[in-house]
Image (cartoon, rainbow, N blue to C red):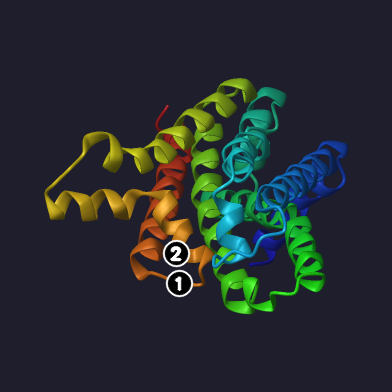
């Protein structure tokens, strides 16, 4: 545990003691603020039966942040270590491959969650000055951030795998972006295929990020969504661990 915490502090320092980390946070704050402003302009002062969180996740800015943040945050995790020549030194230290992987994944995920804190501040300010207090309550707010956390965990795990596969940060970022887009596009299969079979409709609904976030943004926690994201996260981390261990076979 001590080795894991030491590695975690090392990885977090890379994010929070580096200018690029604050640029990412500032960009996210700008896009979330812009998204809320566009949403309010479209409402034109009219009331809506939907909670604010449900309106926000449906904006393109939300998915843009999710899809682009993962490659940017994770592309350096292992690729930079390999290109700089510190990878072998790190992997031969008295720490296990699993500890190294979990430390890098945890640091990326913590930074990802920190990146969304400006959204929380914006929503609380909006709730302070709106007459509809039911538009944003603890249940919907907690549900939305649970959804953001689960999606982030899956995408950070994908980024760990992408970075472990190469020594090029650009290739790592592009691989993560392609994988993230592939997962995202599964949300459209149900509509494009026009399925009538109830079984396949249920299957593709379980794979749809739109459906999952729609529930989370309303404060509904579906165990199928929890299993889906946790399974993807574990699978990607397992594959990344096998990639790290494969160096021993060469």
Q: Are marks 1 and 2 in contact (CB under 8 Å)?
A: yes
- Residue drawn at (13%, 46%), measured in percent from left and top? 196
- Rendered view: 215 above or below 196: below
- Residue picked out by circle 2: 215
Along the horizontal axis of the image, is 241 left or right of 116?
left
Along the horizontal axis of the image, is 18 left or right of 68?
right
Q: Nearer the viewer, residue 186 or 249?
A: 186
Q: Position of residue 34 (x, y in %)?
A: 76, 44
> Is there any visible trace of residue 200 in the rendered image?
yes
Q: Nearer the viewer, residue 34 or 172?
A: 34
Q: Position of residue 234 (x, y in %)?
A: 42, 54
Along the horizontal axis of the image, is 149 left or right of 7?
left
* Quadrant of the image occupied by residue 38: top right
Q: Quadrant of the C terminus?
A: top left
Label at residue 220: 1
Label at residue 145: none
- Residue drawn at (53%, 54%), measured in percent from left and top? 153
- Disc 1 from disc 2: Cα separation: 5 Å
Q: Position of residue 101 (x, y in %)?
A: 56, 49
- Residue drawn at (49%, 50%), measured in percent from left and top? 154
Q: Earlier in the sequence, mark 1 or mark 2?
A: 2
> Is there any visible trace of residue 94 in the rendered image?
no
Q: Nearer the viewer, residue 192 or 18?
A: 192
């Amino acid at each position: 545990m001590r080795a894991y915490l030491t590695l975690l502090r090392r990885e977090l320092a890379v994010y929070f003691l580096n200018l690029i980390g604050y640029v990412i946070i500032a960009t996210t704050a700008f896009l979330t603020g812009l998204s809320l402003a566009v949403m309010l302009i479209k409402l034109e002062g009219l009331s809506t039966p939907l909670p604010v969180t449900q309106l926000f996740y449906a904006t393109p800015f939300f998915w843009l942040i999710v899809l682009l943040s993962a490659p940017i945050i994770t592309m350096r995790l292992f690729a930079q270590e390999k290109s700089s020549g510190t990878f072998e030194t790190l992997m031969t230290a008295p720490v296990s491959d699993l500890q190294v992987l979990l430390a890098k994944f945890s640091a990326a995920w913590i930074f990802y969650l920190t990146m969304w804190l400006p959204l929380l501040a914006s929503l609380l300010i909006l709730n302070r000055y709106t007459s509809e207090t039911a538009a944003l309550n603890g249940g919907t707010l907690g549900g939305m951030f649970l959804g953001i956390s689960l999606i982030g965990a899956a995408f950070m795990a994908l980024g760990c795998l992408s970075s472990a596969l190469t020594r090029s940060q650009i290739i790592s970022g592009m691989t993560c972006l392609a994988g993230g887009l592939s997962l995202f596009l599964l949300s459209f299969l149900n509509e494009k295929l026009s399925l009538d079979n109830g079984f396949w409709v249920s299957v593709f609904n379980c794979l749809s990020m739109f459906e999952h976030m729609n529930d989370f943004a309303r404060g509904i926690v579906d165990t199928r969504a929890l299993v889906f994201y946790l399974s993807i996260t574990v699978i990607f981390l397992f594959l990344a661990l096998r990639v790290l261990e494969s160096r021993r076979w060469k």
